[in-house]
Image: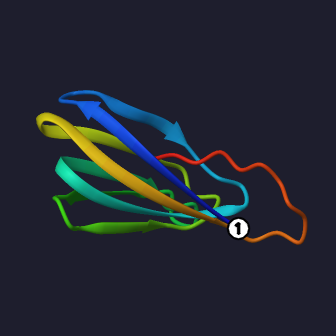
Amino acid sequence: MLSLGDLYLTKGHMREPHWHPNADELDYVISGEVTVSILDPNTLQVCNYRLKPGQVTLIPKRWFHWIIQIRRKHICSCSLTTVKSSRWKVQTYYG
């Protein structure tokens, strides 16, 4: 199962920290510039990735993450979330 979502942020705003118990997340930046922060559950280190239009980040399931807008008035980010489950469940998706 796949989900597709979009996210619009103004400068200085963020997508709150969250995680997906049964889904990987692939984020693609369409416009603007963001920092995607990911908490590695194995090392407890926070990794920060600065993304510009055309760049992608992959966030494994169960990894805590958030997105902060750092440039321009708004960004448009699309996320593609894959759900690997033997049962059909509703999965929340984030951009």
Residue 52: x %, y % from top left: 16, 58
Q: Residue at x 65, y 45 (%)?
A: 92
Q: Quadrant of residue 12?
A: top left
Q: Which residue is mark 1?
A: 1
Secondary structure under tag 1 reads loop
State whether residue 57 is above or below residue 68.
below
Q: Residue at x 60, y 49 (%)?
A: 19
Q: Residue at x 36, y 66 (%)?
A: 57
Q: Front-most of 37 and 72?
A: 72
Residue 32: x %, y % from top left: 15, 46
Q: Quadrant of residue 30?
A: bottom left
Q: Amino acid at mark 1?
A: Met
In the image, 46: left or right of 59?
left
State whether residue 88 is above or below residue 90.
below
Q: Quadrant of the N terminus?
A: bottom right
In the image, 91: left or right of 46?
right
State whether residue 56 is above or below residue 3.
below
